[in-house]
Image (spheres, helix red, strand yellow):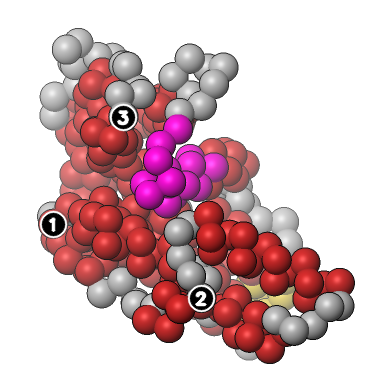
């Protein structure tokens, strides 16, 4: 299948396209288009799936929403805000893979565990007739019933820490790709979520010398392509795994095969850019030390 990227075969082919953000943004916008069309194939109605598989659909929709916002913030060059979205998008993606790979049992467990925090409040207030307690408890029981669970089921629900995340990452990526994704997305964005000193001093403060620091309110616009592409890589792979999975449950994305092929091509080009970036770090580190 011919795509706009057919003539891009090596990292040397991609280098001239990186002189500004035009090409990189076109890759990203095409990913947004593919996600949009995979959720709304006719652009006027949305896909649907059985409730059993709905957590996977919900995570995919969340990835799409956060990807769009990541792209908007990236265009504005607001890196301090941008990196905070990375962990949310990454975690939604890994959980989506976890549920796909582990089947109905994992899906049921995922839904059931979501009620664990609410059961404590219910037990303490289930005899209360006060407005806030009454409304919360009725909604709790209705939601539980809609998912096919009972109060008794919650006795056997034990939240897990998604230990299979590491295994999924190792199956999905090479060591080099995994290191890039973890360091540039999960690691840095975790610092942002937890307000780590490293994140604060590098992004939200300026060192003015003599042991003094001042606020960095008017951040310098910073939107180098190596910041957005690791996130775009996640989105491209999410498209590739979601469409075949959801089409197994019900034939709903008619042009799904062509969407997957295009996403694969975009990811191939992104990997060529990663190769170029790795070369730059190795052979010309001043490029990134000065930026």
Q: Tell me the CA gap for discs 3 and 1.
A: 26 Å
Q: Tell me the CA gap for discs 1 and 2.
A: 37 Å
Examine the rendered structure and indicate whether residue 240 appears above or below residue 78.
Answer: above
Dot 2 and dot 3 residues touching (CB under 8 Å): no
For the point 18% across and 44% down, which residue is it? 275
Question: In the shown orientation, is residue 181 left or right of residue 124?
Answer: left
Residue 170 placement: quadrant: bottom left
- For marks 2 and 3, the one nearer the N-term is 2
Quarter occupied by the N terminus: top left
> What residue did someone put label 2 on?
151
Query: Does residue 63 show up magenta in the picture?
Result: yes
Q: Which mark is residue 58?
A: none
Q: Which mark is residue 250?
A: 3
- For marks 1 and 2, the one nearer the N-term is 2
Dot 1 and dot 2 residues touching (CB under 8 Å): no
- For marks 3 and 1, the one nearer the N-term is 1
Q: Which mark is residue 171?
A: 1
Report the magenta residues as a range: 48-65
Crowd class of label 2 (few under 14; some 14 to 19; many from 20; radius 10 Å)? some
Q: Main secondary structure of the magenta part?
A: helix
- Which structural element holds mark 3? loop
For the point 13% across and 57% down, which residue is it? 171
Q: Tell me the CA gap for discs 2 and 3.
A: 31 Å
């Amino acid at each position: 299948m011919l795509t706009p990227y057919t003539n891009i075969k090596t990292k040397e082919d991609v280098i001239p396209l990186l002189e500004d953000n035009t090409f990189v943004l076109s890759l990203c916008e095409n990913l947004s288009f593919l996600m949009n069309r995979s959720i709304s194939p006719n652009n006027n109605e949305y896909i649907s799936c059985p409730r059993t598989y709905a957590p996977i659909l919900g995570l995919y929709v969340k990835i799409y929403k956060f990807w769009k916002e990541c792209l908007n913030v990236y265009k504005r060059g607001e890196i301090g805000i941008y990196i905070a979205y990375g962990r949310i998008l990454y975690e939604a993606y890994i959980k989506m893979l976890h549920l796909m790979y582990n089947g109905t049992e994992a899906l049921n467990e995922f839904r059931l565990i979501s009620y664990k925090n609410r059961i404590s409040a219910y037990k303490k207030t289930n005899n209360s007739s006060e407005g806030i307690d009454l409304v919360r408890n009725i909604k709790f029981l209705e939601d539980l019933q809609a998912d096919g669970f009972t109060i008794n089921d919650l006795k056997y629900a034990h939240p897990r820490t998604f230990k299979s995340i590491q295994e999924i990452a190792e199956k999905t990526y090479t060591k080099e790709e995994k290191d890039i994704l973890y360091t540039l997305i999960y690691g840095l964005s975790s610092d942002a979520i937890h307000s780590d000193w490293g994140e604060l001093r590098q992004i939200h403060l300026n060192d003015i010398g003599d042991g003094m620091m001042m606020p960095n309110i008017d951040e310098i616009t910073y939107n180098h392509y190596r910041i957005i592409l690791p996130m775009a890589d996640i989105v491209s792979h999410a498209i590739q795994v979601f469409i075949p999975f959801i089409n197994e449950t019900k034939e709903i994305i008619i042009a799904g095969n062509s969407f997957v092929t295009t996403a694969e091509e975009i990811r191939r080009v992104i990997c060529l850019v990663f190769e170029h970036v790795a070369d730059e770090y190795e052979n010309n580190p001043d490029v990134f030390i000065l930026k």
